[in-house]
Image (cartoon, coloured by chain):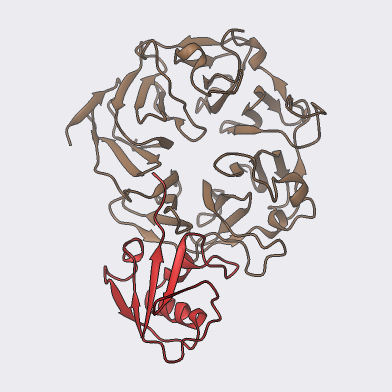
Chain colours: A brown, B red
Amino acid sequence: MGPMGTANDTSAATLLVGTRKGVFLLSRDGGSEWELSDPLFLGHIAHHVVHDPRSGRTVLAARTGHLGPTVMWSDDLGATWTESTKPPAFRTGDRLGRSLDAVFWLTPGHAAEPDVWYAGGSPQGLFRSDDGAETWRPVDGWCDHPMWETWAEWPEQNTPDGSMLHSVIVDPRDSAHLYLGLSSGGVFESTDGGSDWAPLNAGCLAAFAPDTEPEFGHDPHCVRMHPAAPDLLYQQNHCGIYRMDRPEGRWVRIGDNMPTEVGDIGFPIELHPRDPDTAWVFPMDGTDVWPRTSPDGSPAAYVTRDGGATWSRLDEGLPERAWFTVKRQAMTVDDAPDVGIYFGTTCGEVWTRTDGGDEWHQLAAHLPEIYSLEVVTSR
Amino acid sequence: MRVRIPTPLRSYTAQESAVEADGATLDELLTDLDHRFPGLRFRVVDEQGRLRQHMKIFVEQEPVRDLSMSLVGIDEVTLMQALSGG
């Protein structure tokens, strides 16, 4: 395929694009032009395609229509793939009779555990691989926690595409310190490698619940830990944008500082690779019946450079009117000196700009609905 | 016996549309199929031993969902996927 667009940075990079109909690679080999691959796994649902910074391995969480969930891995950036010999699944004879509908989320493990991966599912199971995604097992401390049925959405799954376990986060200082998000259910934390868990939702609103500040039952859409400041968490929630200084243990709503007419509802939140006070969001319409398209059909990202005290609109280059959604895995940033920001839309477009750039550039269009976007850079 | 394979499962059978496998019951047949074509069984049956919702199995001409069904004297089993969606 031919060149699809340009961006300001010119280092080699590949975007891993997971879609409702398969995987696409958008690659730049050092020039300014991006090339779109042919589809991989055409017809398979690709919820998350994630590159492992430790090994270079790429792992794909997929579901093939009615054939159930699976995981594939590639050591050559998508040229060849191998299916896990034991994909994520609940235990046979599971006490609740659970079977996994989808692998929704993937997170590489701690740098000191180079073969460990975590996967989040629907229903909201947590799974772990100790051999580089070849075989998987349930994290029993989560899946069989006495509170699981209370914390998780079970047996009803209230989200249209199923309830999800997402935002699995491993503390770079301590491989046993984990976070996860349940949509719905809230944010949870483990300090013992996943054997036990506790809710971490103080300060976060659950506007839809009778008790608007419950211990759990919230709806985090995306949770991120700052890579350079691991005590700093950011969260795009169903009920606003929050940050937490972990020692304080309380979420603070920084989305209140967004323009009132835009609000602070959205799916993704992405953090600057070095500056703990810089984050990007992509607001969506959470009024009325929740169309989840951009407020007033006017797409824009917003950036804060002061930890959420103030926000600036970034819409240059984007269409003045458009009706897409940016899902929680579909926004990402790179680690370039002038940070590249990327997002994929439900109408199959990929856009990018640099932090210091003037406008968004479209890298691809007419793809299937985009579920996830990750960038791999070689520098 | 002969097992007919639907197109969504042929990535496991080197694109063969029909393969040979053995088993005294459907469950055993699926286990044997998995030995011959690793990964195939989990696409048909979930981790609790339940036939996935849109998978259909015909023993000769009869639709069957009970994996304990005897296959003694059976010559052909057809795996089928009910395609739906968009």
Quarter of the image that includes the N terminus of chain A: top left
**Residue at far left of view:** A2
Residue A325 vertical placement versus A106 (above, below): above
The residue at 36%/24% (across/down) is A351
The residue at 54%/55% (across/down) is A116
| Residue A102 image offset from top left, x and y in percent | 52, 51
Residue A299 vertical placement versus B24 (above, below): above
Residue A377 appears in which quarter of the rendering?
top left
Q: Is residue A32 visible?
A: no
Left or right? Give the position of B33 relative to A125: left
**Residue at far front of view:** B61
Residue A235 vertical placement versus B21 (above, below): above
Q: How many dots with numbers?
A: 0
**In this orientation, which residue lies closer to the viewer: B23 or A253?**
B23
Quarter of the image that includes the C terminus of chain A: top left
Residue A334 vertical placement versus B14 (above, below): above
**Residue at far bottom of view:** B73
| Residue A8 image offset from top left, x and y in percent | 30, 20
The residue at 77%/47% (across/down) is A150
The residue at 53%/24% (across/down) is A292
Left or right? Give the position of B80 relative to A181: left
Residue A374 appears in which quarter of the rendering?
top left
| Residue A94 image offset from top left, x and y in percent | 68, 65
**In this orientation, which residue lies closer to the viewer: A275 or B58?**
B58
**In this orientation, which residue lies closer to the viewer: A42 or B2?**
B2
| Residue B60 image offset from top left, x and y in percent | 39, 80
Q: Is residue A57 visible?
A: yes
